[in-house]
Image (cartoon, grey):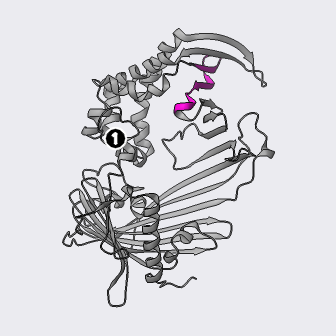
C-alpha cells in the first residue's frame, strides 16, 4: 500500500537535468539507497481492515527496505525498547518471484510466482508474453498534457480513416427537430462484427506504421513489450486478442449531427457473446459533454459515466457516475447502486527558510448517492441511498536541493464513512545503503500450491501470533 502511494506521483522517466521530489526519491532507491520509516493505523468505529488485522490499531510498525539491481528486500516489524524486532516479517523479490517469511511463522518460507502474470493474462495468445502491467502504470502516471500531446495526433489518424470506412456502411439518415427547434440529422450504420474486427486490426497496423503512433507506443512500452504488443508482423496476435468479438452479430452505430455537420451525440451498440464474456451487449454513448459505458446481461446492467474530457485520460479533477442494477444472488430482489465519485487533485511546490524543497500532492475522493444522471427509463425510487464515503490522501515530500540529500515522505490518509474512520500516518526516508542480505529461500513452498484450508490455517496462526506480540504504543486522541 505504501509503495503504491509513492508510485502515484511518479512520472515514467526522469528529466535530463532536474526532476520532481517523488522522482528524486525513486531514483535514490534505484541506485541503492535504503528506505526506512514507520507507519501507524488509528481507527474509530467499525473498520474492516482493523477487524481483519486488529493488532494494527495504534501500533507503530517499522518498515525498511533496499534494492540491489532487480532484487529487493523489505521488512516490517515492531521495535522494542532494546531495539529488538518483534513480529519481523520479510518480503524478498528476485527474478519476478516473491518470497515471504515471518518470525510469527518460524522456519517457513513461501513463494508467490510472478504477480505480474496477472497483467500478462490480459493478452496472451501464444506462449509467454511480457507483462502489460507496467505499460498501464506508465500511462496512469503520465500527466494530462503529455497524454493529450500523444493521443491527439493518433486520434486524428483514426478519425480520418474511420470516416472513410464508415461511409460504406451507411444505412439510414433521418432529419428531425429537437425540442429547442434545432434541426439535426440522425445517421445510422449497420456493421457486421467480423468486418469491424478486421477494421480494428487494420487501424492498429496503421498506427504502428505512423510516426505519431510510434511516439505514443515508445512512451509507454519497453522494447520487449513492443516486440509482442506493437509488432506489425504478428497479425495473429491481434486476431486472437479480438477473437471473442467474432460472434456473427452486427454492430449498430448511430450518430446525430447538426445540419452543418457538427457532432451532437452518438451511440454504439455492440452485441457480445454472454457465454464467453458474461455480458450480452456493450453500449458507448456520447451526449451533452458526457460519455457513458454500459454492459448488460440477463441479470441487469452496469453503467460508468464521466465527462467526455476525462475519459480515463485525466482523472485528476473530475466526477464519475456509476450505476448498477442486477438480480441478487437469491434472485428474490434487484440490487441497485447509483453513485457519484468526485476526484480532486492539488499539488503545491515551495521552499522553506532552511532551503528545503517541498512537494505536497493531495487527492480527495468522495463517493455518494446521485440520482440526477440515471440511465434513460430508470426510476429514482428504485435506487437506494448510499452512505457517503470519503478518502483524503496527502503525500508530502521534502529534501534539500543536493542530489545526495535524503528525501522524506510524510503520508496521511483518512478514510471516513458516517461515524467510522481509519487514519494512516507514515514517515519514510531514504537512507545510506546497508549490506543486501535477504533471507535463505531454500525449500520455499509455493503459496498457491496449498489448499484454501491450508492457507487459512497458516493465516490464522500468523494472525494469532501477531495479535499476541504486537502491542499498541500510541494513544488515541
The answer to whether residue 46 is above or below residue 68 is below
Q: Does the image show residue 252?
A: yes
Left or right: where does residue 466 sit relative to residue 304? left
Q: Quadrant of residue 377?
A: top right
| Residue corresponding to mark 1 | 220
Left or right: where does residue 470 sit relative to residue 303? left
Where residue 55 appears, as percent x and y from the top left, is 49, 77
Of residues 436 and 246, the one nearer the viewer is 246
Where residue 132 appears, as percent x and y from the top left, is 36, 42
Residue displayed at 31% across by 56% down:
19
Where residue 59 appears, as percent x and y from the top left, is 47, 79
Q: Quadrant of the C terminus?
A: bottom right
Residues in magenta? 251-276
Q: Quadrant of residue 85?
A: bottom left
- Tell me the chief SS of the magenta region: strand
Q: Residues within 10 Å of mark 1 (few under 14, many from 20)?
A: some
Residue displayed at 45% across by 44% down:
144
Where residue 312 appears, as percent x and y from the top left, is 50, 41
Residue displayed at 44% across by 81% down:
470
Of residues 201 and 403, the one nearer the viewer is 201
User: For the view shown, which residue lies furthest in the right direction?
Assistant: 381
User: For the view shown, which residue lies furthest in the bottom direction?
Assistant: 82
Assign a secondary structure to mark 1. helix
Amino acid at each position: 500500500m505504501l509503495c503504491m502511494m509513492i508510485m502515484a506521483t511518479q512520472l515514467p522517466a526522469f528529466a535530463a537535468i532536474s526532476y520532481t521530489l517523488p522522482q528524486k526519491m525513486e531514483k535514490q532507491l534505484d541506485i541503492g539507497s535504503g528506505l526506512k520509516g514507520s507507519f501507524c493505523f488509528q481507527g474509530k468505529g467499525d473498520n474492516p481492515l482493523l477487524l481483519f488485522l486488529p493488532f494494527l490499531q495504534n501500533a507503530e510498525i517499522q518498515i525498511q527496505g533496499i534494492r540491489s539491481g532487480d532484487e529487493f528486500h523489505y521488512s516490517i516489524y515492531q521495535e522494542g525498547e532494546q531495539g529488538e524486532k518483534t513480529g519481523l516479517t520479510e518480503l524478498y523479490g528476485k527474478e519476478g518471484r516473491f518470497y515471504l517469511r515471518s518470525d510469527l511463522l518460524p522456519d517457513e518460507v513461501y513463494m508467490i510466482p510472478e504477480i505480474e502474470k496477472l497483467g500478462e493474462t490480459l493478452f496472451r495468445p501464444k506462449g509467454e508474453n511480457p507483462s502489460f502491467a507496467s505499460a498501464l502504470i506508465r500511462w496512469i502516471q503520465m500527466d494530462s498534457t503529455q497524454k493529450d500531446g500523444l493521443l491527439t495526433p493518433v486520434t486524428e489518424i483514426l478519425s480520418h480513416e474511420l470516416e472513410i470506412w464508415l461511409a460504406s456502411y451507411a444505412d439510414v439518415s433521418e432529419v428531425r427537430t429537437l425540442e429547442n427547434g434545432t434541426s439535426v440529422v440522425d445517421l445510422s450504420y449497420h456493421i457486421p462484427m467480423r468486418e469491424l474486427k478486421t477494421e480494428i486490426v487494420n487501424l492498429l497496423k496503421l498506427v504502428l506504421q505512423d510516426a505519431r503512433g510510434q511516439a505514443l507506443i515508445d512512451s509507454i512500452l519497453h522494447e520487449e513489450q513492443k516486440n509482442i504488443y506493437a509488432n506489425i508482423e504478428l497479425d495473429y496476435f491481434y486476431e486472437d486478442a479480438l477473437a471473442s468479438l467474432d460472434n456473427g452479430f452486427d454492430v449498430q452505430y448511430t450518430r446525430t449531427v447538426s445540419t452543418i455537420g457538427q457532432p451532437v451525440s452518438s451511440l454504439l451498440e455492440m452485441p457480445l457473446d454472454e457465454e464467453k464474456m458474461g455480458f450480452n451487449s456493450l453500449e458507448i454513448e456520447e451526449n451533452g459533454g458526457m460519455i457513458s459505458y454500459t454492459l448488460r446481461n440477463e441479470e441487469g446492467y452496469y453503467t460508468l459515466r464521466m465527462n467526455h474530457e476525462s475519459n480515463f485520460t485525466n482523472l485528476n479533477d473530475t466526477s464519475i457516475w456509476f450505476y448498477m442494477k442486477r438480480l441478487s444472488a437469491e434472485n428474490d430482489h434487484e440490487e441497485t447502486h447509483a453513485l457519484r465519485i468526485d476526484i480532486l487533485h492539488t499539488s503545491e511546490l515551495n521552499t522553506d527558510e532552511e532551503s528545503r524543497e517541498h512537494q505536497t500532492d493531495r487527492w480527495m475522493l468522495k463517493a455518494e448517492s446521485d440520482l440526477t444522471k440515471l440511465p434513460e427509463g430508470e426510476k429514482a425510487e428504485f435506487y437506494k441511498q448510499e452512505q457517503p464515503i470519503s478518502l483524503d490522501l496527502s503525500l508530502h515530500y521534502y529534501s534539500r536541493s543536493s542530489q545526495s540529500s535524503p528525501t522524506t515522505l510524510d503520508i496521511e490518509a483518512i478514510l471516513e464513512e458516517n461515524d467510522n474512520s481509519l487514519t494512516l500516518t507514515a514517515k519514510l526516508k531514504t537512507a545510506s545503503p546497508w549490506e543486501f542480505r535477504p533471507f535463505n529461500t531454500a525449500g520455499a513452498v509455493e503459496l498457491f500450491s496449498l489448499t484454501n484450508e491450508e492457507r487459512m490455517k497458516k493465516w490464522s496462526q500468523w494472525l494469532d501470533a501477531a495479535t499476541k506480540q504486537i502491542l499498541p504504543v500510541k494513544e488515541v486522541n
